[in-house]
Structure formats: structure tokens, C-alpha cells
Image (cartoon, rainbow, N blue to C red):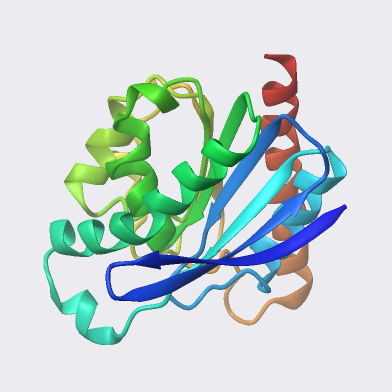
Amino acid sequence: MKISQKKMPVKNREITYTHIETGSRTICFMLSGAGYTYDKPLFYYSTMAMLQNKIDVVHIHYAYGQDLFKHPLNDISEAIIADVKPIVFEVLKNNDYNNTVFLGKSLGTIPITMEFMKRKDFSASTMILLTPLLKYDVILDAIGGSNHQGLLVIGDKDPHYNANQLAQLRHSNFIIETVKGANHSLDIEELDTENSILSLSKVMGKIQEVIRMVHER
């Protein structure tokens, strides 16, 4: 296994990304949440699951001040896409991958739904959306109008959870997993350690299910 940390100039700054290589022909691009970074449980074990199944991983290390989140969703989306997209294309240009997976949580689901799911060159990609921001109609519509296969996981105590909205996505190709009692971190309230670990295990099982779908292609 080869792990390399690289920097790419984007506008007037540099964005760092970590590329973990196993010699695979499949790559998973991971996009973190605003405060939910790659050392947190969902990403730590998702990374382990990918590597266990011989899928390369890229962590893109972006970070934003709170001022960004005062802007409309389109402005937030443009800022994140501008940081993420050049790295995705740089990695694909310099490596011989024939399958792509995108895994994002919360903020990281914005560029997936608003950019990569809309591009023809990623029409066969597998999408894993953890706690997507479903209160935004544009994100809900992007998922509902997509032909992608993948996984959507959200807790029913997440502020972005809405049973009626989720029902609109049941016709999609996404496996939809609602975690009872889970908040936006997919932890079980109130500070329920044991059931939070069981919830994490269940989510990882669903990710393994999606990985099997990728390998069957």
C-alpha cells in the first residue's frame, strides 16, 4: 500500500489531498463534512472497508470559515466544487482507473449531488451519501432524478430528515437506510454509546453491500 499526500494549487491557495493506493482499478473519492473529518468513525471505517476490498481512496482536505455558510447554497456549492473538481480530474488523469466511487457526508454530499452526479463522465459511478442535506430541494431533486446506484444513509433525528421527502426517493436506484434515533453524526441520542457503535456497524455493512455491487460491474 502506498500513501502519499499531495498539494494542488486552486485559485490563490493550495488544497491538500491524501491518495491511498493499493494497485486497484477502482478509486473512491471521499468528501468530508464541515466538522466531520477523515479521522472520525464514519470515514475511518469507510476508508478501511474500501482498502479491505482493494479500492484506492482519496481524501480531499478542504476547510471553510463560518462566513461561507451565510451564503446561498449555490455559492457554497460553487466554492466546494472549485476546490474538489480539479483534484478529482488530476487523480483520474494521472492514474489508470476504470471505476469511480464518491462518498460524502453532509457538506461533502453537495459537490456529489450538484456536480458529479450531473456529469456524463461519471454516469456509471457509485454514489454513497451519508446524511445528505435533503432540506435543500435542489439536492433532493438531484438524487431523485439520478440513475446512479448507491447508498443514502440518514438518521431520523437529523435536522435534514423528512419522512415525506425520503419517500420520494424510494423509486431511485439508491439503497436507503434510515437509522432510528440517530442524529446528524449518525450517533444515537442521547449519548447512547453501545447503540451508536451498533449503528456504525450497520452502516458499514451497507457500505460493504454497495462495494460488492461495484465489484460485480
Q: Is residue 91 visible?
A: yes
As drawn, the residue found furthest toward the top would be: 217
For residue 166, what is the image quadrant?
top left
Picture layout, residue 96 above or below residue 109:
above
Point 83% across, 55% down: residue: 2
Point 30% across, 41% down: residue: 115
Residue 164 pos. (x, y %): 29, 40
Residue 103 pos. (x, y %): 55, 47
As drawn, the residue found furthest toward the bottom would be: 66
Residue 136 pos. (x, y %): 21, 52
Residue 8 pos. (x, y %): 47, 64
Residue closest to the eye, 105 or 179: 105
Left or right: 196, with 173 as reference point: right
Picture layout, residue 119 above or below residue 165:
above
Residue closest to the eye, 115 or 13: 13
For residue 59, what is the image quadrant?
bottom right
Point 22% across, 77% down: residue: 68
